[in-house]
Image: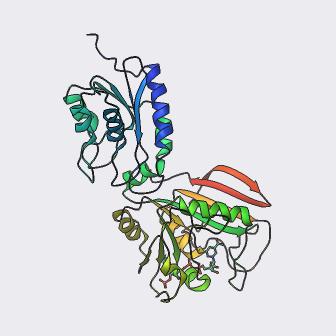
């Protein structure tokens, strides 16, 4: 028998692209990452595939093996091409390494190493059981797909997206406190889509008290998106019993404090891997000052508001040397609004 190569073949690369494609059909929110798996034979032909549908459901490898068995095909001797290093631990489901070894899988080609403190180490377990293992295949694409989960797992806190709307002169509200609406319908529709693409959404107590927002993620026709984030209010003051946010379909939580790292760690403990901050300026500034923002979504409406309410207040910068530099990822125009996506140049990761 010829030895199995220690680098991935062109057919295995191709199979990995398919695995990444099906992985993206799984939910982008929740405690677990999107994972895809395809099983190929010695000719590189895909004989089965599966992807993960979220926490508590079978992992991609188990789904692919299951549908193969349902079709009456023996998995012995096949190669598993997986977008994430197979897990080695028993969480809500059993370890995938064991399932692959027991199925007689001869070779495992994976994309991204698992950074999870409990789930990592799968490649070693597989190698020790005599399975040929190759990692890092199409790694860049794989890391991009599950970037938020990877960052969250490494830092043990949710990925944080900070979004605000401002006038062209940098104001987030008029002098009387009103801020509806600075941007147009299309921009706001995209904000609702982003809400539904995060595990939690947060505002400060002032915004909750002044605006009484529902913070639901709604489609342009007003109906709710299937996924609703947990709605979080941060701050000490009590929110009225009949405040709209209290009946949020994704659940409601108030964090009675100002320690944002404590909040992040509490949310991580609840399985929250992505957090969308919607202001107001005081809470947004505190997240920036604490270096807790992974991505900025700055939306600008084509108007001037003047007055004292700036989009950000004290972010701990008093002189040019302390400026927080950003890398701009994109600038988009839509119906008179501008949407800038940027990331801090010196992120924690
Ligand atoms: N343009 C936009 O994108 C946008 C978005 C949202 C809101 N707004 C507007 O912004 C205004 C409200 O903004 P705001 O800045 O006054 O209030 P805010 O940021 O919504 O809430 C500020 C309050 O949050 C609490 N808090 C929680 N964590 C904190 C921390 N780490 N540091 C400091 N305070 C913390 C404090 O209240 P406690 O004393 O209760 O702890 C603080 O007074 C409204 O006019 C609203 O319409 C605009």
Identify the image quadrant of residue 257.
bottom left
Residue lying at 48% horizontally and 37% vertically, measured from the top left:
20
Identify the image quadrant of residue 97.
top left
| Front residue (pair 67, 76) | 67
| Front residue (pair 307, 105) | 105
Looking at the picture, how far across and down is residue 291, in whole percent?
49, 62
Residue lying at 62% horizontally and 71% vertically, measured from the top left:
312
Looking at the picture, how far across and down is residue 220, in whole percent?
67, 64
Residue lying at 49% horizontally and 79% vertically, measured from the top left:
247
Residue lying at 34% horizontally and 20% vertically, measured from the top left:
6
62 left or right of 35? left
| Front residue (pair 151, 335) | 335
Picture layout, residue 304 above or below residue 96: below
Picture layout, residue 69 above or below residue 230: above
Looking at the picture, how far across and down is residue 171, in whole percent?
71, 73
- In the picture, which quadrant includes the N terminus? top left
């Amino acid at each position: 028998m010829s030895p199995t190569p220690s680098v991935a073949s062109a057919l295995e690369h191709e199979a990995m692209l398919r695995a990444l494609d099906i992985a993206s059909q799984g939910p982008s929110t929740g405690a677990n990452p999107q994972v895809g798996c395809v099983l190929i034979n010695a000719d590189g032909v895909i004989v089965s595939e599966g992807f993960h549908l979220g926490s508590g459901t079978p992992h991609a490898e188990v789904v692919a093996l299951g549908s193969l068995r349902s079709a009456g095909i023996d998995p012995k001797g096949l190669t598993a091409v997986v977008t994430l290093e197979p897990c080695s631990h028993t969480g809500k489901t059993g370890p995938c390494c064991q399932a692959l070894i027991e199925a007689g899988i001869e070779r495992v080609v994976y994309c991204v190493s698992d950074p999870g403190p409990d789930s990592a180490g799968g490649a070693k377990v597989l190698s020790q059981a005599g399975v040929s293992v190759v990692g890092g295949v199409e790694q860049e694409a794989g890391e991009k797909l599950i970037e938020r989960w990877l960052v969250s797992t490494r830092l043990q806190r949710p990925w944080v997206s900070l979004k605000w709307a401002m006038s062209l002169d940098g104001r987030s509200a008029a002098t009387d406190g009103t801020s509806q609406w600075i941007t147009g319908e299309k921009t706001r529709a995209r904000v609702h889509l982003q809400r539904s693409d995060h595990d939690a959404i947060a505002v400060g107590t002032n915004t909750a008290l002044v605006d009484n927002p529902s913070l639901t993620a709604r489609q342009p026709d007003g109906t709710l998106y299937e996924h609703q984030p947990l709605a979080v209010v941060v701050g000490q003051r009590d929110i009225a019993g009949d405040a709209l946010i209290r009946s949020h379909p994704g659940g409601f939580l108030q964090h009675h404090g100002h320690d944002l790292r404590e909040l992040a760690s509490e949310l991580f403990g609840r399985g929250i891997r992505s957090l969308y901050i919607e202001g107001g300026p005081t809470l947004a500034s505190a997240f920036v000052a604490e270096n807790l923002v992974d991505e900025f979504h700055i939306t600008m409406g084509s108007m001037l508001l003047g007055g004292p309410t700036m989009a950000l207040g004290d972010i701990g910068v008093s002189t040019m040397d302390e400026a927080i530099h950003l890398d701009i990822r994109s600038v988009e125009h839509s119906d008179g609004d501008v949407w800038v996506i940027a990331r801090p140049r010196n992120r924690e990761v």
